Image: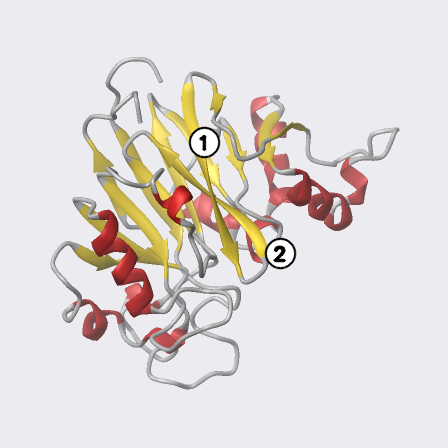
Amino acid sequence: MTGNNSIKVVFLGTGTSTGVPVVACDCDVCRSADRRDHRLRTSVMVTINNQNYIIDCGPDFRYQMIREKVEDISAIIFTHGHRDHIAGLDDVRAFNYVLNKTVDVYASDDVMNSIRREFPYIFTEKRFFGAPQLDFHIINNEKFSVNDIEITPIEVLHHKLKVFGFRIGDFSYVTDANYISEEEKKKIMGSDILVINALRKSKHISHFSLDEAIEIIKEVNPRKAYITHLSHFIGLHHKIEQNLPENIYLAYDGLQVEIEHINQDA
């Protein structure tokens, strides 16, 4: 990463695979009038030097782009291949049409296999008219660059599935995880802002609980931390957040956070 650049992060969605409200549910969270309790599927947009980088594009991707008035994206980077993180890929077509450009996609081999199963028409030998125009780049657990932005993958476990979190300068993002090894945790240390998932208060087989996420945050000790990928079981936003430790917050859809200077050696 060249020079000191500011980074802006927009939480496009902060909900779990069902979103919140959950269809047909009448719990207090799903009936809440507080917009912070209305959660689309999890995704963030990282903006550096007026370039927008999307981490995951789930089934709400089209609406998220419209809501945030996004007119261009530089790349999409995938954490893993579950449908709530890849299902919006077809809606990249709008950027293809309007801007007459191909969109770069960065994903592991496993994610690429999921995309091939979900969107076979993207990969036909004779390109299907109307298919998204994408330029795929395979990533592994090694640093890579998008334009001049250096990105460090953070390999975590989502039960038994390997998932990538990412560190960009002093911003670290980990979603869909219930385990981070000590070696991978070192990559997060020194982050100014950490985003980490917590599905609910009680323990879960493939996601951190709220207490587990807080323990990792305390260990990493970022300046601020935000919790994402929240289900309706987490409880009402205003009630949960008022009891969180200092400098730890529940993320919500549309929230924007900014780091004024990025450590280029991160």
Secondary structure beneath dot 2 equals helix
The residue singled out by tag 2 in the image is: 83
Residue furthest to the right in view is 126
* Percent of width and height locating residue 128: 82, 35
Residue furthest to the left in view is 246
Q: Residue at x 75, y 43 (%)?
A: 116
The residue carrying pointer 2 sits among few (fewer than 14), some (14 to 19) or many (20 or more) residues within 10 Å by Cα, namely: some
* Percent of width and height locating residue 122: 76, 37
Q: Could you give the CA–CA distance between mark 1 and mark 2, rounded to whole angstroms?
A: 24 Å
The residue carrying pointer 1 sits among few (fewer than 14), some (14 to 19) or many (20 or more) residues within 10 Å by Cα, namely: few
Residue 15, numbered circle? none
* Percent of width and height locating residue 125: 87, 29
Please identify the quadrant where the C terminus is shown.
Answer: top left
- Which is more foreground, mark 1 or mark 2? 2
Q: Residue at x 52, y 64 (%)?
A: 17
- Amino acid found under the numbered disc labelled 1: Glu
The answer to which image quadrant residue 247 occupies is: bottom left
Residue furthest to the bottom in view is 26
